[in-house]
Image (cartoon, rainbow, N blue to C red):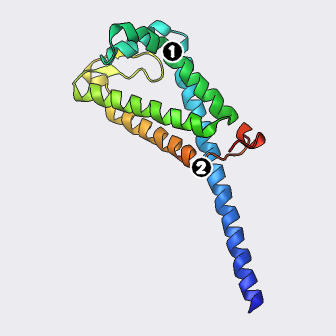
Amino acid sequence: MATDQMARVGGKQEARKRSGAAVIGIGTAARLGLAVVWAWAGLAKISDPEAAAQAVRAYRLLPEALVKPFGYGLPFLEIALAVLLLVGLGTRVAAALSGLLLLVYIGSIASVWARGISIDCGCFGGGGAVSASHTAYLQEILRDLGFLLLAGWLVRWPRTWVSLDVTLALD
């Protein structure tokens, strides 16, 4: 009897280890995936800050006085999030900020779609007015919802492999 019970306990412990490793592996992939997305978005915009400001302007959500500060500042925020996620430092906070930024992006895209404004989202550079046939609002929202799920995963389970959080025991 005792041997059967020990075998069951050992099996449960082994199953927990495997599921823990899977959670950490998924988290690592989510962290690195988001890092790539933010780096790609930020680097695409940072080389042409005027185009980034034009993309912000096209949404018609901010007063003109805030368009340039937002357009010029967003690439730096995206790159900062990319670096934090890449090295795994402050993963939960970086994921939460990523989630908030993605919610802003989703809401902004939904807003222009609802108002019948035809723009390129400018998510990965460019942006501005386009013909109605060149909009892809549903795809952009679905893409950002996918990224939001990755961010949510990291908020819930921030422990990942090869991260400064683990090295510094911050998680």
Relative side of 14 to 59, left or right: right
Amino acid at dot 2: Trp
Picture coordinates of residue 51, whole percent (x, y): 44, 10
The residue indicated by pointer 2 is 157
Q: Nearer the viewer, residue 70 or 38?
A: 70
Look at the picture and state if 16 lies above or below 150. Answer: below
The residue indicated by pointer 1 is 73
* Residue shown at the point (52%, 32%) measured from the top left: 97
Amino acid at dot 1: Gly
Instruction: Give the SS element for disc 2.
Output: loop
Q: Residues within 10 Å of mark 1 (few under 14, many from 20)?
A: some
Picture coordinates of residue 10, whole percent (x, y): 74, 75
Q: Nearer the viewer, residue 123 or 56?
A: 56
* Residue shown at the point (46%, 33%) measured from the top left: 100
Q: Earlier in the sequence, mark 2 or mark 1?
A: 1
Relative side of 30 to 105, left or right: right
Instruction: Tell me if residue 136 can be seen.
Output: no
